[in-house]
Amino acid sequence: MTIASAALLLFLILDPLGNVPVFLSLLRGLPPKRQRFVLARELLIALAVLMMFLWGGKYALELMHLRQESVSIAGGIVLFLIGIRMIFPPPEGLMGEIPDGEPFIVPMAIPLVAGPSGMAAVMLMGSNEPTRLGDWSLALLIAWGATAAILFSATMLYKLLGSRALTAIERLMGMLLVAISVQMFLDGLGTYLQISPP
């Protein structure tokens, strides 16, 4: 996996376009200056959590006596479920009910930006190729930077594209995530069954 493909995968998992309406509704009651502060804080917390899973994932797997294939299969299943929810969103939204008040860590940083699928993906990258942690960190920073740029321009983007276009883009991203998740599942299963890819 190249840095560009890893960054694209992480960008799809972070799903900034799908998060735009949710973030707008969460920050609606705050003054503009406070909105920017809360958004920056939550994005930095999400980045710190993902970096922690990237760099410490290998040791966490060893501590829990988990094989890399099991993380790949589990990550594929979680990604598949997130992708399905993006394509067919439930009435209460992608991540369920959102609590009132100013958000802190939950639900903006976790699980909307740094969700279980993102944590599983970076842990898998770090444990599969620990010698390329610098590359994966760069890919994560690129994906996070693009996510931050989209979420900071959320109001303008929402006005420009409208809810229909954002919904269509989110569903397209869901389709891509489903395809990626199936590949992750098959890779993990293939490694476990000692099947080499064609």
Image (spheres, rainbow, N blue to C red):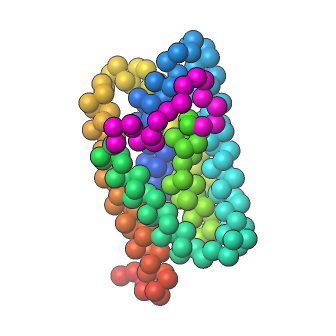
**Image coordinates for residue 110, horizontal then vertical, percent:** 58, 42
> Is residue 153 shown left or right of residue 137?
left
- Seen at 69% across and 71% down, the residue is 64
- Residue 166, relative to residue 95: is it above or below? above
Give the image location of residue 108, x and y in percent. Answer: 56, 35
Magenta-highlighted residues = 90-106
**Would you place residue 67 above or below residue 161 in this image?**
below
List x then y, in percent, for residue 40.
Answer: 62, 29
Q: Which of the 4 quarters of the picture holds residue 187? A: bottom left
Say whether residue 127 is magenta: no
Q: How many marks?
A: 0
- When the figure is inspected, residue 156 is found, relative to residue 127, above or below; the finding is above
Q: Residue 114, image x and y in percent?
A: 57, 46
State the residue at coordinates (63%, 74%).
Answer: 66
Specify the farthest residue to the top: 31
On the rendered structure, is 184 left or right of 44? left
Residue 37 shows in the view: yes
The residue sitting at 32% across, 33% down in the picture is 166
From the image, give the main secondary structure of the stretch colored magenta.
Answer: loop
Quadrant occupied by the C terminus: bottom left
Q: Is residue 4 visible?
A: no
Name the outermost residue toward the bottom: 194
Q: Nearer the viewer, residue 67 or 101?
A: 101
Determine if the magenta segment contains residue 104: yes
Residue at 73 percent across and 71 percent down: it is: 63
Question: Left or right: where does residue 161 sit relative to residue 124?
Answer: left
Left or right of residue 133, residue 194 in this image: left
Q: Nearer the viewer, residue 47 or 19?
A: 19
